[in-house]
Amino acid sequence: MPTFADIKTIYTDGACSGNPGPGGWGSVIYFTDGSCHEIGGFVPQTTNNRMELQAAIAILELLQNKPLPQSIPLYTDSEYVKNGITKWLVGWKRKGWKTAKGKPVLNQDLWQQLDQLNDTSIDWRYIRAHAGHEGNERCDQIARAFSQKQTPQLQQITMAESETQNHSMPEPSEATIGASRISHLHDLIDTLEIADYIAKEGYLISSSELADLMSVHANAVTSRGDEWVWRNWLISRVRREGNQILWQLERLNS
């Protein structure tokens, strides 16, 4: 099982059908052992630049407070994202989120999120799109699928957060490992059945409850927009009650 300290490279990409129009984003982490972890999402009305930003935001949210390598190359085929985070952001903030021409910075909400999540270990790199790079091509496939309201099969793994091991303990047997995996699958099935029940009954759940269901931080829910896809469900923002945002789950057709 790879750890966050085993991250080799990261790729991100966004897509939009219409620009503006339905959009999708995809991000992939590659590990030193050759494995990878893929994430992605859907937004019903957006722009290509916002999806490029969202792809980077989502992956950095996943890495928050994790033990990371000293340097992680993050490849984006968006010069807008790469130049924004490495060159333009300092000036925008100094001018009160205004451009050199005095106009408001577009997509300020996402730029502020990206700025807060950015880590010194991230080495931002631009890569030309559709040039045969495996990571870029895969992110493009994921993003385009979501933008077309499809649900792509994502390769996802459970990552350990630390390489620390107690070497005085015996190695787990195959039976123990198998039991642990089966237990994990049982937990996953329970989660999916709960999500299905919530969708079937039309219950509304809060951002924190949805985050618990998805096993993510609450800000990973609220930063995805008003409508997006998680596994087999379309997640839609319904309304706000006090300080709580309420969400609805709708089962997608297979």
Image (spheres, helix red, strand yellow):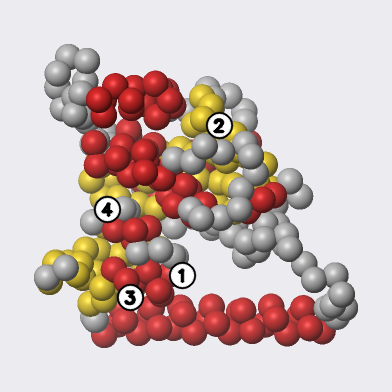
Q: CA distance from mark 3 to mark 1?
A: 10 Å
Which amino acid type is shown beneath numbered disc 4? Gly
Residue 225 tag number: 4
Which amino acid type is shown beneath numbered disc 3? Glu
Contact flag, marks 4 and 3 (Cβ < 8 Å): no
Q: Position of residue 172 (x, y in %)?
A: 83, 78
Give the residue at x 85% y 70%. Answer: 167
Q: Residues within 10 Å of mark 4 (few under 14, many from 20)?
A: some
The residue at which mark 3 appears reads as 209
Q: Residues within 10 Å of mark 3 (few under 14, many from 20)?
A: some
Contact flag, marks 2 and 1 (Cβ < 8 Å): no
Q: Position of residue 46 (x, y in %)?
A: 25, 42
Is tag 2's residue or tag 1's residue first in the polypeptide sequence? 2
Position above or below: 191 against 6: below
The residue at which mark 1 appears reads as 215
Q: Secondary structure at mark 3?
A: helix
Give the residue at x 27% y 53%. Answer: 225
The residue at which mark 2 appears reads as 123
Q: In front: 10, or 191? A: 10
Give the residue at x 41% y 45%. Answer: 117
- Closer to us: mark 2 or mark 4? 2
Residue 41 tag number: none
Q: Position of residue 198 (x, y in %)?
A: 31, 81
